[in-house]
Amino acid sequence: MREKEIEKKLALEVKKQGGICPKFVSPGLDGMPDRLVLLPGGRLAFIEVKAPGKKPRPLQMVRHEMLKLLGFAVYVLDDAGKIGTILDGI
């Protein structure tokens, strides 16, 4: 399954839960996660979507750690089967 297909499934599942999953673009700050997940009740997380078996680049890992230190949840999603578990964790 390609990264784009996993992203589409993520957006669909978030929508089913009453949330939104916008593409996150941060000009001037490379390496930020691909998607924001905004769920009812003020729940928020950053999601880095990867093709199956692929890992985040070193700069992406730095950005993930920066966000985690600020108190935000950051997930790496490389398997559509993990979407439910991730959403339950947010």
Image (spheres, rainbow, N blue to C red):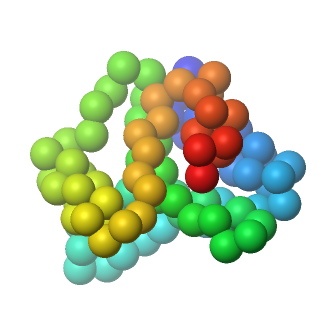
Question: Across the whole image, how many numbered discs are drawn on residues?
Answer: 0
The image quarter in which residue 18 lies: bottom right
Q: Residue furthest bottom?
A: 28
The relative height of residue 51 versus residue 73 in the rendered view (above or below) is: above
**Picture residue at 63% right of the left edge, 23% below the top:** 81
Specify the quadrant that holds the N terminus.
top right
Picture coordinates of residue 41, whole percent (x, y): 74, 70
Whether residue 20 appears in this view of the structure is no
**Picture residue at 36% right of the left edge, 75% below the top:** 26
**Picture residue at 17% right of the left edge, 56% below the top:** 62
Relative horizontal placement of residue 43, taking residue 75 as reference (left or right)? right
The image quarter in which residue 7 lies: top right
Whether residue 41 appears in this view of the structure is yes
**Picture residue at 60% right of the left edge, 52% below the top:** 90
Relative horizontal placement of residue 80, taking residue 52 as reference (left or right)? right
Picture coordinates of residue 40, whole percent (x, y): 77, 67
Relative horizontal placement of residue 86, taking residue 29 as reference (left or right)? right
The relative height of residue 17 versus residue 38 in the rendered view (above or below) is: above
Relative horizontal placement of residue 4, taking residue 33 as reference (left or right)? right
The relative height of residue 20 versus residue 8 in the rendered view (above or below) is: below
Picture coordinates of residue 5, whole percent (x, y): 62, 34
Picture coordinates of residue 4, whole percent (x, y): 56, 39
**10, 43: nearer the viewer:** 43
The relative height of residue 7 versus residue 18 in the rendered view (above or below) is: above
**63, 3: nearer the viewer:** 63
